[in-house]
Image (cartoon, rainbow, N blue to C red):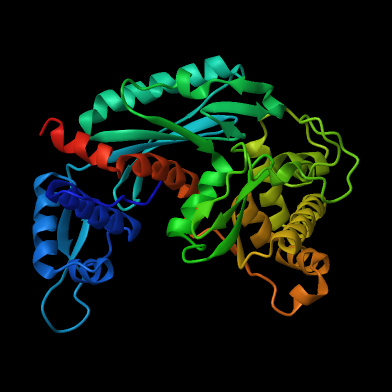
């Protein structure tokens, strides 16, 4: 939960206000001045000054000079402390993983990227657990939590099902357990949407739809910045909706899944390339490059997949009525390289009353970091609590 509870004693009130100020600085990306935060939180100036000093003494946050835009008194921005808390963020994909750190405020720095060549989940997750342990040993006590994005539905720390990899009911959180630190696991597309809502093109949007395209497709519906998780935590499997009437059989057990016609695997299928579960990312990139160079076969494949993306997006807009739609992963390339094919299919698929003012479809504002940022938010949400802050201030200096 992002909300900070109320307080009844003076100590609880101090902790409550510290958390409010730190949460606000984090949500504003470390780009808000003390005066802006003081005004937005309704704090007295003297109280804010004491709180900023407390945050600095605890190595939680620190002010830095703001860029001077006009004459007047210099201002300072409240942002991450150079020795402050870090989240370890992991983007686990079918064919590799990326591990990064994130500071309060959301800035990420990649520390390791590595392919993995085996599919049994115990082997993949065991190798990832060892990599996480190495990073934790190097970073020490600054790490306050680990957020892991996985390309499949997640429930209670378990991977419910990644059909094309035959991963079913995998106890991922138990395998990845990192000592006393919380290891929090989420679906990659959902976390990309969370990041977009908090720091990207869906920020400030009351109802937004995010779609993440990789080998296939998933997403999230976000209400006031938070994803809807569903009754059992597995909402957002838009790729497994039979939206286009295809007769293709999906590994998930359904016929006609939208994801079979959108993503890297769909590009490979459309060009007759060899299909191997969780492989072919480089081949899909080559298809896009050849399409950009005018190769007719690759251009036809690109247009086919972009049309499928546009038609399915329109179906979701008709059903969900979002204010805007964002795309990440391969979706940004499909949208950018086959703009006309996507736009025509999107418009044709909309109900008539949507066409005068269709929800805009926008590329991610976060680039390739969207999933990592979302994973880091899982860790910081767990840290920015009374328990998390108390544990930090009681830890080693």
Q: Is residue 131 above or below residue 370?
A: above
Give the image location of residue 294, x and y in percent. 75, 58
231 to the left or right of 275: left
Q: Quadrant of residue 279?
A: top right
Q: From this viewpoint, is residue 177 visible?
A: yes
Q: Residue 392 placed where, x, y %? A: 20, 36
66 to 174, vertically: above or below: below
Q: Is residue 110 visible?
A: no
Q: Is residue 311 above or below residue 121?
A: below
What residue is rendered at 67% in x and 34% in y? 280
Where's residue 332, x and y in %?
61, 56
In the image, residue 335 lies at what x, y percent?
A: 67, 60
Res. 233 image quadrant? top right
Image quadrant in which the C terminus is located: top left
The part of the image, by quadrant, that contains residue 52 is bottom left
Outermost bottom residue: 71
Residue at 75% across / 41% down in the picture? 240
- Residue drawn at point x = 56 percent, y = 55 percent: 222
How many marks are shown on the rendered structure? Answer: 0
Q: Is residue 197 above or below residue 268?
A: below
């Amino acid at each position: 939960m992002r909300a900070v509870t109320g307080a009844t004693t003076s100590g609880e009130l101090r902790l409550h206000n510290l958390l409010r100020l730190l949460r606000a600085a984090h949500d504003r990306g470390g780009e808000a001045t003390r005066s802006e935060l003081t005004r937005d939180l309704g704090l007295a100036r003297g109280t804010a000054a004491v709180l900023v000093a407390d945050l600095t003494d605890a190595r939680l946050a620190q002010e830095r000079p703001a860029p001077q835009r006009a004459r007047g008194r210099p201002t300072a921005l409240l942002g991450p402390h150079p020795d402050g808390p870090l989240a370890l963020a992991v983007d686990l994909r079918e064919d590799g993983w990326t591990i990064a750190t994130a500071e309060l405020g959301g800035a990420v720095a990649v520390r390791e990227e590595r392919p993995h060549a085996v599919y049994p989940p115990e082997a993949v997750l065991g190798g990832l657990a060892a990599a996480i342990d190495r990073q934790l040993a190097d970073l020490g006590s600054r790490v306050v939590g680990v957020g892991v994005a996985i390309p499949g539905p997640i429930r209670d720390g378990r991977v419910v099902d990644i059909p094309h990899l035959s991963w079913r009911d995998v106890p991922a959180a138990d395998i990845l357990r990192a000592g006393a630190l919380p290891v929090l696991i989420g679906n990659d597309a959902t976390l990309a949407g969370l990041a977009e809502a908090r720091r990207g093109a869906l920020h400030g949007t009351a109802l937004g739809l995010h779609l993440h395209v990789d080998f296939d497709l998933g997403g999230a519906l976000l209400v006031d910045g938070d994803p809807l998780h569903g009754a059992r935590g597995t909402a957002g499997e838009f790729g497994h909706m039979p939206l286009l009437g295809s007769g293709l059989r999906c590994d998930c057990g359904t016929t006609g899944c939208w994801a079979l016609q959108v993503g890297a695997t769909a590009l490979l299928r459309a060009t007759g390339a060899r299909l191997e579960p969780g492989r072919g990312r480089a081949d899909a990139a080559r298809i896009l490059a050849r399409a950009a160079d005018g190769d007719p076969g690759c251009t036809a494949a690109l247009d086919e997949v972009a049309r499928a993306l546009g038609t399915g997006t329109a179906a979701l807009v008709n059903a969900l009525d979002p204010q805007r739609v964002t795309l990440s992963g391969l979706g940004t390339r499909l949208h950018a390289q086959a703009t006309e094919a996507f736009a025509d299919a999107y418009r044709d698929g909309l109900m008539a009353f949507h066409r005068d003012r269709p929800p805009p479809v926008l590329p991610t504002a976060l680039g390739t970091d969207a999933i990592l940022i979302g994973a880091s938010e899982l860790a910081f949400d767990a840290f920015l609590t009374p328990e998390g802050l108390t544990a930090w201030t009681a830890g080693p200096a």
